[in-house]
Image (spheres, rainbow, N blue to C red):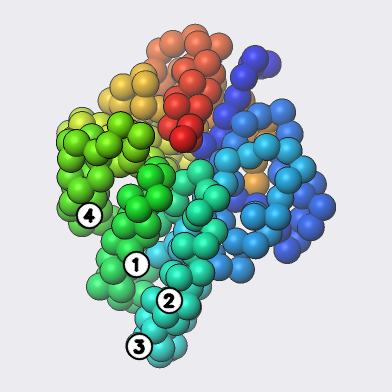
Amino acid sequence: MKFRRLADAHCHADFSEYADFSGLAFGLDLCVDACFPGDWEGLKKFDAFPIKKAYGIHPDLRISEFEDIAFVESEIFGAFLPKLSEYIESADAVGETGLDRNLERRVPMYLQKRLFDAQLELAGKFGLPAIIHCAGEWGAVFDALKAWTEKYGTAAGERRDRKKTGRFLLHAAKCSREMVEIFESMGGYFSFGLRELGCARGAECARAASAGRVMVESDSESSKAKIEDTVSKLAEIRNVEADEMSETVFANFTEFYSK
């Protein structure tokens, strides 16, 4: 199926392997996330065609359970976060960042939370949306986002020139119908890949979200074919025409990432 406009709200690219950027998709709008320090410079230098750029530090951290956590923590807050601030000055979003219970054996939850809060603070400081990763820690993610949106969101009465501060995108969304309603009231959007749409929890989340808050994602190297399939699946789940779903997703992408 051919759509007039397509958008991938959350994808990644290996800039060390794809030095000529041939791994990136043409023919659709997209936001590329560089969520490890080694990827930041490659994304910053990319100018082959316009894309939205997000910089952050993933909760994974790519460390082993045997590494010195105190040293890792010192490096993150002494070197990496200050460096991240430099990239965020020209970014369209911060992230992905968040919490992941599956990583707790390697990355203690206190460290994940501290890092998550620090990146939300950067998003608030620069007036940018945040891209959120959550696995098994919905309560803690809610607490962090609630505090952040109360400080920087519309409920906090921010200045008119920062009216979009406090937006966040729950990528790979699979939260409950009840949490969808709560997150929407706080400024939340939701993006879905084929993986999420193929499971009961993800499909229920996709049905529950408001039309003006849904997007699609590849969460990998993007392609038109992959995004077309995802839009078609989302349209099927929401019982709307695929062309209409494509236009809705594109409009939401444009609204979310506009400054």
Which tag, 3 or 1, sits closer to the chain's start? 3
Callout 3 secondary element: helix
Tell me how far mark 2 sits from mark 3, CA to CA.
Answer: 10 Å
Quarter of the figure with residue 111: bottom left
Amino acid on which the number 3 mark rests in the picture: Ala
Q: Which residue is mark 1?
A: 115
Q: Give the class, few, some or many, for how many residues have Cα within 10 Å of label 2's Cα (few <14, many ≥20).
A: some
Please indicate, yes or no, whether residue 122 appears anywhere in the rendered image: yes
Amino acid on which the number 1 mark rests in the picture: Leu
Quarter of the figure with residue 73: bottom left
Amino acid on which the number 4 mark rests in the picture: Ala
Which tag, 2 or 3, sits closer to the chain's start? 3
Which tag, 3 or 4, sits closer to the chain's start? 3
As drawn, 207 above or below 102: above
- Considering the image in quadrants, where does the N terminus appear? top right
Q: Which residue is mark 4?
A: 144
The residue shown at (33%, 50%) is 124
Q: Which residue is mark 2?
A: 76
Amino acid on which the number 2 mark rests in the picture: Ile
Residue extending farthest to the right is 20
Marks 4,1: beta carbons within 8 A:
no
The residue shown at (29%, 61%) is 117
Marks 3,4: beta carbons within 8 A:
no
Q: Residue 250 in the image: state x and y as whole percent.
A: 53, 23
Q: Which residue is mark 3?
A: 70
Please indicate, yes or no, whether residue 65 appears anywhere in the rendered image: no
Q: Give the class, few, some or many, for how many residues have Cα within 10 Å of label 3's Cα (few <14, many ≥20).
A: few
Tell me how far mark 1 sits from mark 2, CA to CA.
Answer: 8 Å
